[in-house]
Image (cartoon, rainbow, N blue to C red):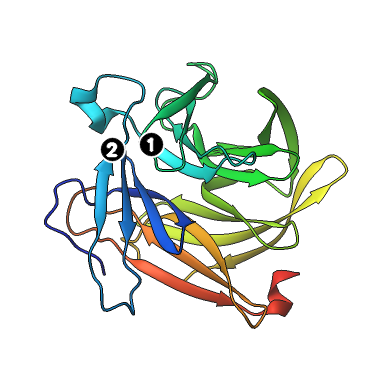
Amino acid sequence: MLSSKDPRFGGFSGLALDRGRLLALTDQGSVAWLPWPDSADKRMLIRQLPDGPYSREYTWYRDTEALSRDPQGRGWWVSFEKANELWLYDLALRRALKRVRLGLYRWPTNLGIEGLVARPGPELLMFPEAEPRMFAMRRGRGVAQGLAGGQLKVSEAAMLPGGKVIALERDLSLGFSNRLVWLQESPHGWRVVRRLQLPAGLLDNLEGMTVQPLPNGSNRLWMISDDNFQRPLRTLLIAVDLPPERQGA
């Protein structure tokens, strides 16, 4: 379990690898470079994004839900769910470079973009939280893509080596239910090829995930939970290793 006295720490909604460190995004518009669990250096760097929709005085309202490297190498894309916008920041996350409005009423409140995946092409895949399709941004234009295998309740997505996409899926009833979902590209878009239930607790809302390739050919999934800045929810950093044979599931 992770903790910090910094009031900006918590509410994590996105995760990525950045120059050998874990980069986490909070839903209030902060980014945090986290120490590795086995590192002797436990220092964390956290700061606000330099700009975004709505006033800087009300960053809690920004609702930043996903981040991904720009497929052209210019920096980082961040999704703002309430505003239905994407912003591109430089590599150091200190300067905004571009703003893309997806349409304020495209999705209902809190059902906008929850996952971003960069692909060669260049292409940026966008995953709304609950819709039977996904979207791809190619050279500034959005294209809808079909999704076979049922509607996904996506909270995060990432690219596996080899081209498959893996997503975090979340249900909420008496508590949170978290699953991994493998997606395979098809002639008409994408299709679900496998689901795997994760043994997380009922109060653990997994919202961030990134893929770390390992020297033995397997992949390590790093996942982080959203504590919503309130107890008894907690911030967990979880590692799950996928053997090479499972990557092709």
x and y, in percent, of residue 234 in the image? 25, 61
Name the disc covering residue 2, or none.
none
Q: Locate residue 174 relative to residue 136 in the image: left or right.
A: left
The residue type indicated by label 1 comes to: Thr
Circle 1: element type: strand
Q: Tell me which residue sits at (27%, 28%) in the image.
A: 61
Q: Quadrant of the C terminus?
A: bottom right
Q: Residue furthest left?
A: 5
Q: Residues within 10 Å of mark 2 (few under 14, many from 20)?
A: many
Q: Quadrant of the N terminus?
A: bottom left
What residue did someone put label 1 on?
Answer: 64
Circle 2: element type: loop
What residue did someone put label 2 on?
Answer: 28
x and y, in percent, of residue 80 in the image? 42, 30
Which of the 4 quarters of the picture holds residue 33?
A: bottom left
Q: Is residue 16 above or below residue 30?
A: below
Which of the 4 quarters of the picture holds residue 132?
A: top right
Q: Residue furthest bottom?
A: 216
Residue 200 visible, this orientation: no
Q: Are marks 2 and 1 in contact (CB under 8 Å)?
A: yes
Q: Residues within 10 Å of mark 1 (few under 14, many from 20)?
A: many
